[in-house]
Image: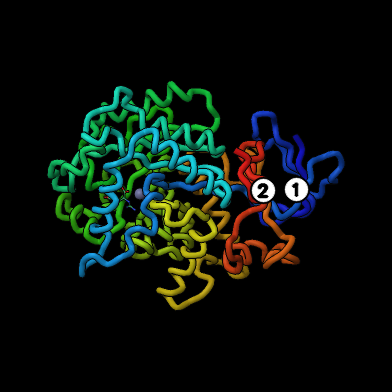
Amino acid sequence: MRLFAAMAFLPGGWAPDVGLEVAPDGTIVEVQVGAEPGDTEVLDGPVLAGMPNLHAHAFQRAMAGSAERRGAADEDFWLWRGAMYALAGTIEPDGLYELARGVYREMLVAGYTAVAEFHYVHRDPRGAWYADKAATGRALIEAAKDAGLAIALLPALYMQADAAGTPLAPRQRRFATSVDELLAIRDALRDAYDGDDDVVVGTAAHSLRAVSAAALDALADDDARGAPFHIHVAEQEREVAEVLAATGMRPVQFLLERHHVDARWCLVHATHVDDAERAALARTGAVVGLAPTTEANLGDGLFPLRAYLADGGALGIGSDSNVSLSPVEELRWLEYGQRLATRRRVVAATVDGESCGEVLYARAAVGGAQACGFAAGALAPGRRADLVVLDDRHGPLAGAPPGEVLDRYLFATDRAAPRHVMVRGRWRVRDGVALR
Ligand code: NGQ
Ligand code: ZN
């Protein structure tokens, strides 16, 4: 298949008259600048790589907007978590499939072309195993396949209630897993989806609160495939204090000292890092996973974005609790949080002349793809043809010079969504409508 775009965002920036040759398996095999439209499908708007969503808990969409009424004087993350546990206690595989399929379809329409599902509701509501230990994970993968986006399913290890090793509370019983059980789930899903180009099965540790140091040793290094490994790391200050008390180290410091943190790793909510942790993390090649709308919603705090980007650190975005399903909103709030805190503008662009929107979009797409384990995130040979076509017929994008397209898209567009979305060479959204 050959595609032609009058304007496409390539790794080096916007380019005119771009021809994309896509192999039958959906991989881009050639990118030609200055091509002729000729006998090809013409993409009718500015073209970008699709955005990977590197962190989501699909089921939490069912409570989005439902925990915003004051119930106690000290409303915080931990009280929200109690409401979330009540919801988690009710999910069954069939309902999870239906819910997740709808959520994933909305993500696709908003411009996400892959999702990493951080999955820890493993057991049935009473805390017993389903006959198929991988039942809930399978429901999520089927939901993504039926919605039409790629999925990295990350079964997450969950063993204890806090970093001191307190046993799980009754409301956490659905999450309970041993390392062996978790690897059995991973391997069952790998067998079931072997050879499926739209499914990656990695692993996760819920957090340094929920796993022991010994279990993390066993899990983090056990993957001959080198698939992604994710962990919630330092979202709340109380969490930092808890890990410090239990280990003598801050969470990111602990991971860097004890583990070979590398490009397989995604540190979700590396929010609370000191300068030394931040600088060291940027050198590892690991991806920092940020979820700006959820982190704002839950009152988490702000990651030191500018210094990390200036050091060349990798990052990506996630919709996490799914209060927003739009990559535009995540990237907008990633930048706006920094502007509000620092009272400066154009924070993510660290080099003179750089466009803030281009830096944010390009780095989140590349980092997100790495964290999901897909060769995607850029329009380049060897990468998947996961792409979006923006609508420049009216609104802020109409008549935009190339150098402003991404800034207008991220900062000046209400109800921003692409016109068309393609996943691995197949149209999944046309004129704003999901095709499945
Ligand atoms: C989660 N979500 O696992 O869904 C967490 C809350 C926890 C976010 N951190 C629970 N956004 O961290 O213990
Ligand atoms: Zn999360």
Closest to the observer: 186 or 267?
A: 186
Left or right of 303 in this view: 331: right
Q: Residue at x 34, y 65 (%)?
A: 301
Q: Residue 305: horizontal and vertical position, in percent?
A: 43, 63
Q: Mark 2 falls on what kind of element?
A: strand
Q: Residue 167: horizontal and vertical position, in percent?
A: 13, 41
Q: Relative to residue 104, is residue 298 depicted above or below?
A: below
- Quarter of the rendering occupied by the C terminus: top right
Residue contact at pointers 1 and 2, CB within 8 angstroms:
yes
| Mark 1 neighbour class, 10 Å CA radius: few under 14, some 14 to 19, many 20 or more | some
Closest to the observer: 228 or 136?
A: 136
Q: Which residue is mark 2?
A: 420
Q: Residue at x 71, y 55 (%)?
A: 46
Q: Residue 358: horizontal and vertical position, in percent?
A: 60, 60
Q: Residue 334: horizontal and vertical position, in percent?
A: 46, 63
Numbered disc in front, either 1 or 2: 2
Q: Which residue is mark 1?
A: 43
